Structure formats: structure tokens, C-alpha cells
Amino acid sequence: MRRPDIIGVGAMKAATTWVWHQLNSHPQVVMLPQKELHYFDNLNITPEQYLDRFGVVQRNYLTGEITPSYLNVPHAPIIAKDVCPAARILVVLRNPVDRAFSHWKVAMWTEGKIPLGTSFMESFDCGHPWGNYWHSIKERGLYLKYLKRWYAAFPRNQIKVMWHDDILKDAAAFLKDLYRWLSIDDSFVPKNYNKKFNENWSGRNPTFKPEDRQKVLSFYLPSIERLEKFTGKDLSEWKK
């Protein structure tokens, strides 16, 4: 039975749609047309039905899916390991402070999942108005808490943690690193690698109040420092 070679697990609002497009653009990769299958967070189909989705892709191509909510679902790593033990697990992380603010904007004005007029800090402090606690805007930024579960389930060499900052700094270099990890032609450069995807199309772009930013940073700072030690990545820019 065909199984996914790549499972992108998050984080939400960390350019995962852009990553999906860049993977799908590669001549050695065929991602499923539906970017997010939401199997490991919803479990509303059988494992066989999930894997059947990948059966349409010829075996000489890599294939996979990206569902950014997987990162924070406590049971997802265990089930993913059972269903897809050889899959490469891709994680892209963004400054959790900026991620939270972006999440709020999209959830309110693009998706309509937060009542209009709810302030950012109200949304951040009260959690998510729908779903389980791990879906909350605040909880989704506690990366290491959930990342450790994926490392407990999968061998370290099957997990790739990448950084939203590196996409902004040098998107071509980011993709070269990603393609090399997947053992595919890393000299390939997609035509649309500078294009943005899945932006906030509401036309509303409120300013992140400095006092709100400082409150959120104070909350995340201890977890940022632990993530920095765990990954060896210099996250100085996240602490400002």
C-alpha cells in the first residue's frame, strides 16, 4: 500500500502553504491536490482510507500532505508512526509572537472563526473559541512541548525542523536545504518560489500594539529559550 513519504505537521501560519507549492513544483514530487487531509487530528476515516489517497501517485515520485494542525495534536505522533513509520516529518516554525497575531487576523476576518470585534489579547488569553485546548492561539506557539512528542515517536533523522525566518532571508537556499534532505534534485528552483500564498485577503491589517507584543513575548520567552537549546538554532531575533 502506498504511504506518504512526507508529512508536514506545522506550524500554522508558518508558510506551510508556500512549502506545499514548492514541493509540488519539484519534478520528483507529486503532493496530493488537497494540501490538508486532517487525518491525524480528526481520525474520521480508517487508516486504509487515508492511505488510499496516496495510491494515485506513481512510486517513482515522492508524495505527501501538509496539515499544520498536526504539530499540536497530542495523539498525532503515535498514530502517524503506526500508519506511516517511514515518513519524513517536516516542521516549519515561526516566531510564536508573530504567528499568534497572524492567526488572530486570519481566524477573525478571513475564516470567520473568531467573533468580529474580539481583540487580539482577548483571543490570545481566552484560547480558541472552538475545538480542543491545543487548538488555541496561545497553545499553538508552545512548539517544544509538542515537538518533543514527534521526536519521541520518530527517529531524529526522519524529522526536519526548518524556520520561517530562513524563507524570508533566502527562499532559494531554504528550498535547496529541503530538497537535499528529501534526496531529490536540490538544484531545481521553482518559478513561483517568490510568490506568497494563503495571505490575509480581508484587506484589514491592524497594527500589533507594542504593549500587546511585549505581553505575548513575555509569555513565550521561556519556551523560546528551551527551543533554542533543544534545536541549537540561534533564536535571538524571536526574543526582541
Image (tube, grey):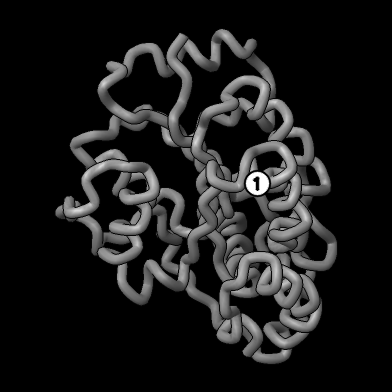
Image-based side of 159 in relation to 76, left or right: left
Q: Work out whether residue 6 or residue 199 is closer to the camera in this orientation and state it.
A: 6
Residue marked by disc 1: 71
- Looking at the image, residue 87 lies above or below residue 101: above
Q: Residue at x 76, y 44 (%)?
A: 130
Tell me the quarter of the image containing the C terminus: bottom right
Image mark count = 1
Q: Give residue 21's quadrant in the image.
A: top left
Instruction: Residue 24 in the image: state x and y as whole percent.
Output: 29, 39
Image-based side of 47 in relation to 125, left or right: left
Image-based side of 190 in relation to 171, left or right: left
Three-letter amino acid code at disc 1? Leu
- Looking at the image, residue 6 lies above or below residue 20: above
Q: Give residue 169's quadrant in the image.
A: bottom left
Q: Report helix, strand or loop for mark 1.
A: helix
Q: Work out whether residue 147 or residue 71 is closer to the camera in this orientation and state it.
A: 147
Q: Work out whether residue 120 or residue 186 is closer to the camera in this orientation and state it.
A: 186
Q: Residue at x 33, y 13 (%)?
A: 56
Q: Give residue 15's quadrant in the image.
A: bottom left
Instruction: Residue 45 in the image: state x and y as whole percent.
Output: 63, 14
Q: Residue at x 54, y 51 (%)?
A: 91
